[in-house]
Amino acid sequence: MLELPDFAPLRITFNRASRRTFDSLDHLLIVSTQGAGARALQKFPQARQLGVLLTRAHHRGDDFASSRLSNARATGVTVAEYSAKATFAALSWARRVVAECTRDKPATLGIAFADVLSESEASAARSALVSAAAAAAFNLPTFKSADAPPSLRALRLIGQAADPGLESAVASALGNNLARWLTALPPNVLTAAAYRSALAQLAEKHGLRYRFINEDKLRKLGAGAFLAVSQGNPDRDAGIAHLSYRPKRGRAARLALVGKGILFDTGGTNLKPFKGMLDMHIDMQGSAVALGALIALARLEVPFGVDAWLAISENRLARDSYKSQDVVHASNGTSIQVIHTDAEGRMVLADTLALASREKPELIIDYATLTGACVMAVTERYSGVFTNRIAANGDLVRVGAQSGERVWPFPMDDDFDEMLKSDVADIKQCSAETEGDHILAARFLQRFVPSEIPWVHVDMSAGQHKGGLAHVPSEITGFGVAFTLELLRGTTPAELAKRWSA
């Protein structure tokens, strides 16, 4: 059984501002506004010294400076100036500041705000810092013989009242930490059996329903696209996991989250080169993000039902691996001409989308580290989005900006299908050429979602970014959880579907 950590180890409290509170901290962060000067720091210990240090930092081009308080604990102190306007910039600022505050591995961090910040500035900075601190406090899996150094465990928001608005940031951090942890596990640790064990534990802990559709059941359902990929696995333990959250009132699935869960991708018969295969244990990140988003929405107790469908398999090179020019049939009856066995993600997603569609949700979102073409198009800083509702594109861009998980929409015109025409089947799996593969992959997947169901496909080019991204300090970013929560903030799948279809 896979032993799961606490995915929300950071304990957040609200405390009065006093010298006693400051002296109880391992580190104190004071947030001011750009150009406010030493006068804004007067209510804090050693204000004059901090003002001098901040002036020196300005000359270096920095917007924060650090020192220590002259108390028995030698509490570290950092003063940082907040001037971000966009959410991504605010989150990136917060990651840098939290990294500075946690250099000496404090167990307790306090955050206080100078009076010169406006209410909106303080709220934005507070949310960004909580997100960054929650990400920094969580340790990704390590298998070193030496114990990992202690990490941040307590965050005290000083001189501030309890903020219900932080609930979303805390839920998002929970889902993001979960997604990053699962994605970082080595492929011999996160096997299909281990993943199923983790899912069962998480379902029990968070009050979710859980079932696993194994290969025998998938065969009866006609899921030949999924089975074409899984037939090369050494063990017969692949399948589609189905988890469900239901509010107190409501039995139907209103939102379906679908994730690619390829636990290791060799490329199959079309074998990847060494560097292309090296990090292919993270090719299951789409499923981890779908799962993290489901658990975050359940924690927020959203008033609509949510299902997660996770396509769990490996793509291995074996005697029974599927081959170029094989013809297989998906569960919705579509025949597929296989072109390239390293386009396995769209194969397993085809059947998973088709099965999720049978529940008639009001919205489907799928997540996948699907194509290198999307990385080439938008780099690893953005992710690509594709939808069968052109009216949704404006909302998707706005939500990406507001969540700090930025996305860019791509065209989905019908004439792209000419590149997927097959002489022997209903559709080609992909083109033998490379141009526009991210668009062709989306056009292929759209065939497995009925036109009456609004659908968004997220090609997670920002699922991995060296040095971290926004508030997340690790190379594995867990991109997609915050985006999903922001998309559903204050609305429902039914309302989105109605707006996008108008």
Image (cartoon, rainbow, N blue to C red):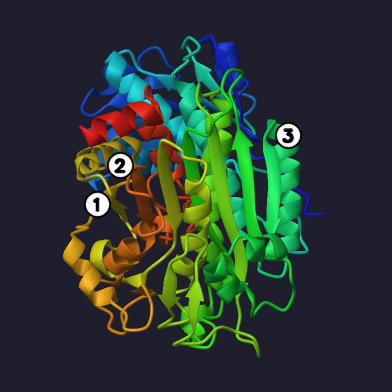
Q: Amino acid at mark 1?
A: Trp
In the image, 256: left or right of 23? left
Residue density around tag 1, few if under 14, some if 14–19, many if 20 or more, within 10 Å: some
The kind of residue on which mark 2 rests is Gly
Disc nearer the start of the sequence (2/3): 3
State the residue at coordinates (48%, 68%).
Answer: 347
Sequence order check: which comes first, mark 1 or mark 2?
A: 2
The amino acid beneath tag 3 is: Lys
The residues tagged by marks 2 and 3 sit, at their Cα atoms, a distance apart of 30 Å
> Residue 7 at x, y = what percent?
64, 40
**Quarter of the image where the N terminus is located:** bottom right
Residue appearing at x 46%, y 18% in the figure: 45
Residue at the image position 47 percent from the left and 33 percent from the top = 254
* Residue 448 position in % (x across, y down): 41, 57
SS for callout 3: helix
Dot 3 alpha-carbon crowd within 10 angstroms: few under 14, some 14 to 19, many 20 or more: few
Does 417 appear above or below 287?
below
Tell me the distance, in whole angstroms, between the alpha carbons under discs 3 and 1.
35 Å
Image x and y of residue 206, in percent = 68, 32
**Observer able to see residue 77:** no
Compared across the picture, whether 401 is left or right of 137 comes to left
- SS under mark 1: strand
